[in-house]
């Protein structure tokens, strides 16, 4: 606030500027009443002094000294009440003030200090709050334009120089900044993972109640950075919470109105992201139909299907808050892989609650495509140990009519790969050996009926012990000693069980052909 502005506020507007006209732009930082002449210790730059000169009403030299001190200390001006204790100001004081562009304002004796001070205090407070807001780092966010929730989170993380993440009302992680580091609330950065605090659900309920009256909450955990909690709201209903860690206490000095606007902006961004992926899902289904049709007329082109699986992908099928479409967040995460994949035309699609990539490109590039996926998965898992991903890759098909069969095959391949090669993360159709044939056989009714017929006597619950004995016996190539050791039973007990098995199946299980039949049936049962 300038001296010129102050002269228009409240009853100070009845004052008269005696001298110091060139100092009307002096900035007022504070206002104080002075009746004690010892001003040296408490005068600060920008202060506006009000006085009657009561204690030195008969000492003109002292009055002049005070004005001199105010000028030297950088005060903005002085307001003197004339007509009560002094009737005019010393000429030397006026000359000094005029020379130094120091405003001296006189006010009539009937004006009360309080009628001048209160309006000025209010104006100074308003300006201080505005200055805090204007210079507050979050103030810029209100004016910023973001294309996605992810971009906004990264921007906030850059401002606070700390982690920022978003959770739903069950504490499941929905977004996290690239610089995410564990804190007292959560350790895992995996999509849909939960906080480590045991009572987190109860605490979230308390926060939601607080959000009824507050636009943000300051939450402190001993030994960790303070945290600002900002609600995501739609239709007056909280559906998520943004966690903003910070070390600079000034970040918490922000008014509720600004934070409310920030909350609304981030809420709209979150929902916009959801709508984007929902629309994109429909577009990609249309695109897939187009490629399936085009591949028939182009002998050089082929289609490859990639099936994804990870713990965080399976959680997308669980019921969520009505405002949060978990499948959209899974697609966003998978886009991280696709953004690095430059072979042909590739996009994500969903089918039967599973997530796949549809790749359309040259048949001759299939080996290169496979290699590219292997490298991407290895790189992704190396940097996301808490979010490891597996994938199975179909052969390259050139007929759209085989799409459903290839989809079933690549899905089944994932199940088989996890069972027979759990240490691997990429499963290829042509590297599963005999399982390539078994994949197809498991869907044949005649094979299932044959398997059930052969093994049915051992599939009853009371014969589970005999079934497990047969599996271990065949795995050890009929070696009695090794089988009994693996089962921790005596040889006589094992021989007794073998006799019971042979009676139930009506076959000699030591016979190589019988062994082959049983191995085949057991494997089909395992893979079905």
Image (cartoon, grey):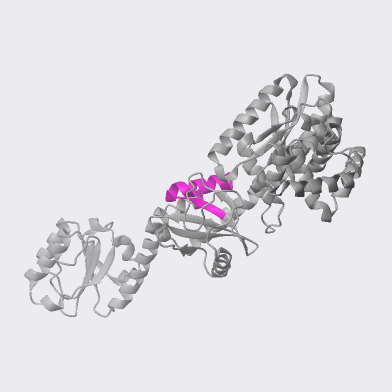
Total marks drawn?
Answer: 0
Residue 509 vs residue 136, the one in the foreground: 509
Q: Position of residue 146 (x, y in %)?
A: 55, 45
Q: Is residue 401 visible?
A: yes
Residue 11 vs residue 67, the one in the foreground: 67
Q: Position of residue 445 (x, y in %)?
A: 91, 40
> Which residue of the protein is positioned furthest toward the front in this rendering?
492
Up the image or down, 346 lies above or below 145; here it is above
Question: Magenta segment, which residues?
Answer: 142-166
Q: Quadrant of residue 486?
A: top right
Q: Is residue 77 left or right of residue 300?
A: left
Which residue is drawn at the image coordinates 65% and 44% (left, top)? 310
Residue 374 vs residue 424, the one in the foreground: 424
Residue 491 is one of the magenta-drawn residues: no
Q: Is residue 220 left or right of residue 168?
A: left
Up the image or down, 378 lies above or below 5; here it is above
Residue 53 vs residue 125, the one in the foreground: 125
């Amino acid at each position: 606030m300038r001296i010129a502005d102050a002269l228009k506020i409240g009853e100070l507007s009845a004052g008269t500027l005696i001298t110091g006209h060139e100092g009307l732009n002096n900035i007022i930082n504070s206002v104080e009443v002075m009746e004690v002449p010892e001003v040296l210790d408490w005068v600060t730059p920008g202060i506006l002094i009000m006085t009657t000169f009561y204690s030195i009403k008969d000492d003109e030299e002292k009055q002049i000294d005070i004005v001199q001190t105010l000028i030297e200390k950088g005060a903005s001006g002085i307001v003197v009440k004339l007509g009560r204790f002094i009737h005019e100001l010393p000429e030397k004081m006026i000359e000094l003030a005029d020379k130094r562009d120091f405003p001296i304002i006189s006010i009539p004796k009937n004006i009360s200090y309080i009628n001048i001070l209160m309006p000025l205090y209010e104006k100074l407070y308003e300006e201080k709050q505005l200055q805090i807001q204007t210079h507050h780092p979050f103030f810029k966010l209100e004016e910023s334009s973001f294309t996605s929730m992810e971009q906004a989170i990264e921007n906030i993380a850059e401002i606070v120089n700390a982690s920022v993440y978003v959770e739903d009302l069950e504490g499941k992680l929905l977004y996290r900044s690239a610089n995410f580091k564990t804190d007292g609330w959560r350790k895992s950065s995996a999509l849909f993972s939960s906080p480590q605090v045991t009572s987190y659900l109860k605490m979230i309920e308390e926060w939601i109640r607080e959000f009824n009256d507050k636009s943000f909450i300051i939450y402190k955990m001993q030994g960790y950075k303070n945290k600002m909690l900002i609600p995501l709201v739609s239709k007056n209903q909280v559906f998520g919470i943004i966690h903003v860690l910070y070390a600079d206490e000034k970040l918490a000095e922000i008014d509720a109105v600004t934070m409310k606007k920030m909350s609304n902006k981030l809420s709209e961004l979150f929902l916009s992201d959801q709508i984007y992926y929902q629309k994109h899902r429909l577009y990609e289904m249309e695109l897939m139909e187009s490629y399936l049709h085009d591949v028939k007329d182009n002998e050089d082109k082929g289609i490859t299907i990639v099936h994804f699986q990870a713990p965080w992908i399976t959680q997308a099928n669980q019921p969520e808050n009505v405002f949060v479409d978990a499948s959209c967040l899974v697609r966003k995460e998978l886009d991280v892989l696709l953004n690095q994949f430059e072979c042909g035309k590739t996009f994500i699609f969903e089918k039967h609650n599973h997530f796949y990539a549809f790749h359309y490109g040259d048949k001759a590039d299939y080996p290169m495509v496979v290699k590219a996926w292997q490298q991407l998965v290895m790189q992704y898992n190396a940097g996301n140990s808490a979010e490891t991903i597996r994938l199975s890759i179909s052969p390259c098909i050139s007929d759209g009519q085989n799409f459903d069969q290839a989809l079933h095959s690549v899905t089944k391949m994932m199940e088989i790969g996890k069972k027979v090669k759990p240490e691997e993360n990429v499963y290829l159709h042509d590297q599963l050996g005999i399982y390539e044939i078994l994949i197809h056989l498991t869907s044949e009714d005649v094979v299932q009926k044959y398997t059930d017929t052969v093994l049915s006597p051992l599939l009853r619950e009371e014969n589970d012990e005999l079934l497990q004995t047969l599996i271990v016996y065949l795995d050890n190539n009929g070696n009695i000693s090794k089988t009994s050791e693996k089962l921790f039973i005596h040889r006589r007990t094992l021989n007794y069980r073998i006799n019971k098995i042979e009676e139930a199946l009506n076959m000699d299980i030591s016979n190589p052909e019988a062994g082959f039949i049983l191995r085949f049936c057991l494997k089909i049962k395992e893979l079905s």
